[in-house]
Amino acid sequence: MKQQLKLTILSAATMALLGLIVVSSAEPLAQGSNPDVVKSEIDPKLVLRPKGTKLFDGNKAQLIKQGEALFKDQKLSTNGSSCQTCHAENEGFSSTFASAYPHEVTMAKEKAGTSEVQLDEMIQFCMVVPMEAKPLPWNSRDLAALTAYAGELQKAFRKRLQSNDARAGNSSAPK
Ligand code: HEC
């Protein structure tokens, strides 16, 4: 008798649970809510230098070389991208990249509300947002290497922008 009661309760609970699952899966997605908007917002603390940060300092030429390798390394991301996936041949940068840091970058402003970023902060930004990974440790050699290499890319980017402007007869190239 006791056993039977247990069974009854158990099957009633199962039925209730099943009912719940059916009802909740049949529920239409809330109208007007855009999951991308929620997902895209990130905590600025993840990407802005904490106070008192000491960045790694080392031989510039070696850092640039290491940074170039890291730039192509998919292992830095969790989604199979490398920096190179988006920024090969200096693509994927807006004209802001030509300006000295810190400066405003649209993506950083839209996703974290930051009015301006440093180069290393921008790299952390790309680590967290497009690369879907953790930010690199602030004092790491890897961050210093990527920053050094990105600095070289910036120089090339400026040159290309200036020569494009010269060809277009536009003298207002960014300083
Ligand atoms: C899925 C594409 C994608 C990947 C992967 C990616 N980025 Fe970016 N990156 C962007 C976009 C988009 C912007 C923002 C452009 C804007 O809003 O002006 C950007 C901006 C930047 C900027 C700043 C440009 C400026 O205007 O000052 C730097 C530097 C940068 N990325 C470096 C990196 C590095 C280093 C990596 C690898 C750790 C990386 N990115 C990975 C898409 C990507």
Image (cartoon, rainbow, N blue to C red):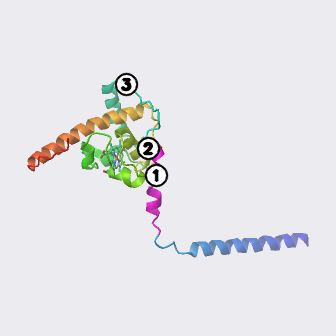
Q: Nearer the viewer, mark 2 or mark 3?
A: 2
Q: Residue at x 41, y 54 (%)?
A: 111
Q: Compared with residue 142, is residue 99 higher up or lower down, i.e. above or below?
A: below
The x and y percentages for residue 76 are 43, 41
Q: Is residue 30 visible?
A: yes
Q: Which mark is residue 47?
A: 2
| Disc 2/disc 3 C-alpha distance (Å) | 22 Å
Q: Is mark 2 within 8 Å of ligand 1?
A: no
Of helix, strand and loop, which one carries label 1? Answer: loop
| Disc 3/disc 1 C-alpha distance (Å) | 30 Å
Q: Which mark is residue 58?
A: 3
| Quarter of the view holding residue 10 | bottom right
The x and y percentages for residue 106 are 33, 52
User: Reading the chain from its start, which is encountered first: label 2 or label 3?
Assistant: 2
Name the amino acid, label 1. Answer: Ile
Which residue bears the numbered disc 1? 42
- Residue at the extreme top of the image, as rendered: 59
Q: Nearer the viewer, residue 151 or 67?
A: 151
User: Reading the chain from its start, which is encountered first: label 3 or label 1?
Assistant: 1
Assess whether mark 1 and mark 2 are in contact (beta carbons under 8 angstroms).
yes
* Region of the chain picked out in magenta, as a range: 33-46
Q: Is residue 160 left or right of residue 143?
A: left
Q: Compared with residue 144, is residue 127 higher up or lower down, i.e. above or below?
A: below
Q: Is residue 133 visible?
A: no
Does the segment drawn in magenta span residue 108?
Answer: no
- Residue at the extreme right of the image, as rendered: 1
